[in-house]
Structures are given as structure tokens and as C-alpha cells.
Image (cartoon, rainbow, N blue to C red):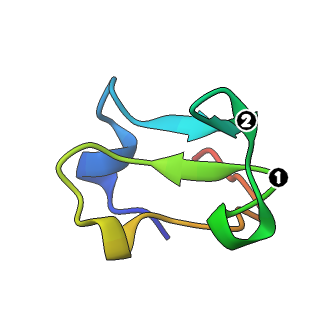
Amino acid sequence: MLPANFADDDRTLMALELDGVTLSMDHGYPVRLIAPDRPGVMQTKWVSRIEVL
């Protein structure tokens, strides 16, 4: 689960590519969540569900 302060940030995004290239499995294919000011090791890989409350 992504903490609310990151989910509510306008800069948080769902990435489909890295430098214009489709994400590889190692980088979270098919989609990876990128949240600003969150340590790299805490960036969410392999998004399997999005739930909006």
C-alpha cells in the first residue's frame, strides 16, 4: 500500500517505460509506480492492483 502523502502528490506517476523503452521484468514490467522523494528501494514494482478510496 502506498502511503497517502505519496498517493496524493501530483508528481506520483505510473511508469510504462524507462528512457523511452518498455520496462523489463527486472524494472517492474508492465507498470511501476514512481513517487517523488521516496527512496529508490521503496519505489513500487510489479503493480498488480489499483484501488481508489
Q: Estimate the x, y position of residue 17 in percent, counting from the top left.
A: 68, 36
Q: Residues within 10 Å of mark 2 (few under 14, many from 20)?
A: few
**Which of the 4 image quarters holds residue 10?**
top left
Which residue does the image show at 50% across and 34% down from the upper left? 13
Q: Secondary structure at mark 2?
A: strand
Circles 2, 1 touching at the beta carbon (< 8 Å): no
Q: Estimate the x, y position of residue 2 in percent, counting from the top left.
A: 43, 62
Query: Is 40 in front, or is 52?
Result: 40
User: Label 1: which residue?
Assistant: 30
Which residue does the image show at 35% across and 76% down from the upper left? 41
Q: Estimate the x, y position of residue 47 in percent, counting from the top left.
A: 70, 62
Query: Is 30 in front, or is 4?
Result: 30
Q: At label 1, which amino acid type do we have?
A: Pro
Can you tell which mark lies on residue 42? none
Q: At label 2, which amino acid type do we have?
A: Val
Direction from residue 34 to residue 39 in the image, left or right = left
**Which of the 4 image quarters holds residue 7?**
top left
Q: Nearer the viewer, mark 2 or mark 1?
A: 2
Q: Secondary structure at mark 1?
A: loop
Direction from residue 45 to residue 38 in the image, left or right = left
Q: Is residue 18 above or below residue 51?
A: above
Q: Is residue 25 above or below residue 52?
A: below
User: Label 2: which residue?
Assistant: 21
Q: Residues within 10 Å of mark 1 (few under 14, many from 20)?
A: some
Count of marks overlaid on the render: 2
Query: Is 12 in front, or is 50?
Result: 12
Direction from residue 17 to residue 48 in the image, left or right = right
Q: Earlier in the sequence, mark 2 or mark 1?
A: 2
For the residues labelled 2 and 1, the Cα–Cα distance comes to 11 Å
